[in-house]
Amino acid sequence: MSWKRLWIPLSILPILGLLAYGFRTDPRAVPSPLVGRPAPSFTLALFDGGRLDLDDLRGKVVVVNFWASWCYPACYEEAPALQEGWRAYRDRGAVVVGIDIQDTEEGARRFIEQFGLTFPNGPDPGGKISIDYGVYGVPETFFIDRQGRIRAKHVGAVTAPLLRERLEALLEEPA
Amino acid sequence: MRRARFGAAPIGLAALAVLLVVGPCLAGAVSDEEVRRIAAGLRCPVCQNLSVADSPSEMAGQMRQLIRERLAAGERPEEVVAYFTAKYGEWILLAPKPEGFNLLVWTLPFAGLLGGLAGVLLVVRRWSRRPAPAAEAVDPAYRERIQAELERLEGS
């Protein structure tokens, strides 16, 4: 077969390659440039009245979870896992912080009550914190190490095994 | 000379006072147009192919508000865009920066266009150079037969 005949079938190859690449990436996934960088500071006015400053948690492993009461089912799936993780690891130096975004206070309070959440939770008025964290949907969860750096980002509901694995790894690191 | 100098000082002071009063107000007033221009170049994170300027979503609204606040705080438009790029990566820019690998996106269409044009020219030239087919000699047997049949037709 001459080169001229091969030319047309061969020209399909780059197109196939491009399609294979395109279909394997999720067009809705937004890569986060924040992993590896210092976690942006924030002050959260908690639903139970207190205030929480991220900088005060330096030295601890922090799980920052962005959620909303309208985020069904993912946020409803992960809430028990987060509460369980908080209960199991708080004594070992881990903190779970919930940030409620684009929500009504009423809905948020009902959600917290429904799952009996005891970790610090607060709203994000104006979306300042979520934009600062490059959040593009709920739920999204950031894992912050003892040095205050973002080490991982999880998009979608976290599961108990995932939470355990990440927390164990980060807690083992020296402060 | 002296008088003129003394005369200019109060005017200068007055101008300074006006600037001091009006300046911050001017800086605080951010035009909708400026916010829109920045928002139109940012991709709305919760939408499918909509800019922050065009999206009715709550998040886009919050982003527009943030753009306004940052401009009001004295940031230049490039700094506002750089803030969003630092948070969301280059993903947030509706038009990729023309550098590195991205250059392909900017140059490939034109390269394709030029290549196609060159191809068409080449083919046209080849076709126009091909000699016109010479009048072919007709098979003598056919010629004879046509002749004979024509004669027969005329004869009848």
Image: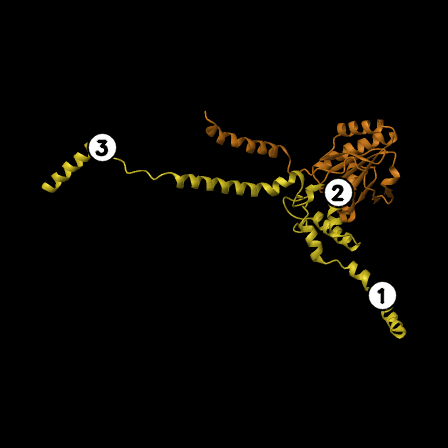
The picture places residue A84, in percent across and down from the top left corner, at 80, 31
The picture places residue A62, in percent across and down from the top left corner, at 83, 35
Dot in front, 3 or 1 = 3
Point out which mark residue B51 bears: none
Point out which mark residue B139 bears: 3
Q: Which residue is mark 2?
A: B86
Colour chain B appears in:
yellow
Dot in front, 2 or 1 = 1
Q: Which residue is mark 1?
A: B16
For image coordinates 38% across by 38% down, the residue present is: B130
Say few, some or many: other residues with alpha carbon within 10 Å of mark 1 (under 14 / 14 to 19 / 20 or more): few
The picture places residue A88, in percent across and down from the top left corner, at 83, 29
For image coordinates 12% across by 42% down, the residue present is: B154
From this viewpoint, which residue is outermost toward the bottom? Answer: B3
In this view of the protein, can residue B121 be seen by the observer? yes
Q: Earlier in the sequence, mark 3 or mark 2?
A: 2
